Image (cartoon, rainbow, N blue to C red):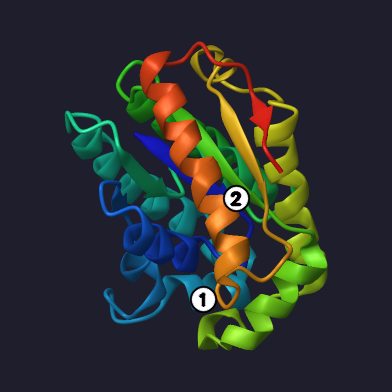
Amino acid sequence: MYIVEGNIGAGKTTFLKLIQERLPEIAVVYEPMNSWFSKVYGQSILANFYKDPHRWAYTMETLAMACRVKEHLIEQENPNPFRLMERSIYSGHYVFAINGYHNGFLSELEWQVYLQWFNFLVTGKCMPPQGFIYLRTVPEVAYERIKARDRSAEKIISLSYVQQIHDCHEDFLMHKKGLLAELVHVPVLILDCDKEFETDPEQFAVLAEEVASFVQLGKQKPGKTPSISRS
């Protein structure tokens, strides 16, 4: 499987929907946003997190980790290599959880408990993907897209927070800072997604071609292709 990563507002869900239409031989697994975005538990945990991150960060990150680990374990048993997953246990940890910890949203005790769960659930149990596909956007573009889609839970998101999430993605996928050893050599396809691709078929065709080539390349040499940028 391959994992599609990117900032809030990068256009991951839209990108995957368009990939399904253009490359139907590739299966798509969407992020389980309903688990924390809507009122599955009587309230929106995501909205609560944005309003009061110090109170809700640990709840949010542990729930997200549990959902993503469950999904990952299911998908890694699927024999079809042509699958794209939206976000992952890895961005959940290296981007959102770490950013929350650095901001003081999680206490030291909560962070240590979270790390114990992460190490228990992920290390040695979750197989690394065949590759990451990074929808890279500058924070200002991502922020404008967040405002344009006007989701109620996201109204409180600030540009500074989007910048933080961008920086964490850069550390994770560009610089591979502090990654688990098994992730360091996983190839990364970097796509420039600042340009509008939803309403520009020619622009999206370029991105889709890069994805098709990358997935085929990864199938031939799983885990051994160096990180590359095709944009």
Front residue of 106 and 37: 37
User: Helix or strand or loop: what does disc 2 sit on?
Assistant: helix
Q: Tell me: 158 left or right of 72.
A: right
Picture coordinates of residue 160, whole percent (x, y):
82, 66
**Mark 1 — residue?**
48
Quadrant of residue 34 in the image?
bottom left
User: Helix or strand or loop: what does disc 1 sit on?
Assistant: helix
Disc 1 or 2, which lies upstream in sequence?
1
Q: Is residue 147 visible?
A: yes
Q: Is residue 185 above or below residue 116?
A: above
Q: Residues within 10 Å of mark 1 (few under 14, many from 20)?
A: some
**Mark 2 — residue?**
96
Q: Where does the C terminus fall, quadrant-wise?
A: top right
- Marks 1 and 2 close (CB-CB < 8 Å): no
Q: Residue furthest front?
A: 202
Q: Where does the N terminus fall, quadrant-wise?
A: top left
Q: Is residue 102 above or below residue 126?
A: below
Residue located 55% across and 73% down the image: 198
Front residue of 107 and 156: 156
Picture coordinates of residue 155, whole percent (x, y):
63, 85
- Give how far apart the Cα atoms at labels 1 and 2 are: 15 Å
Front residue of 115 and 83: 83
Residue located 42% across and 65% down the image: 18
Type of amino acid under label 2: Phe
Mark 1 or mark 2, whichever is nearer to me:
2
Type of amino acid under label 1: Asn
Q: Tell me: 214 left or right of 85.
A: right
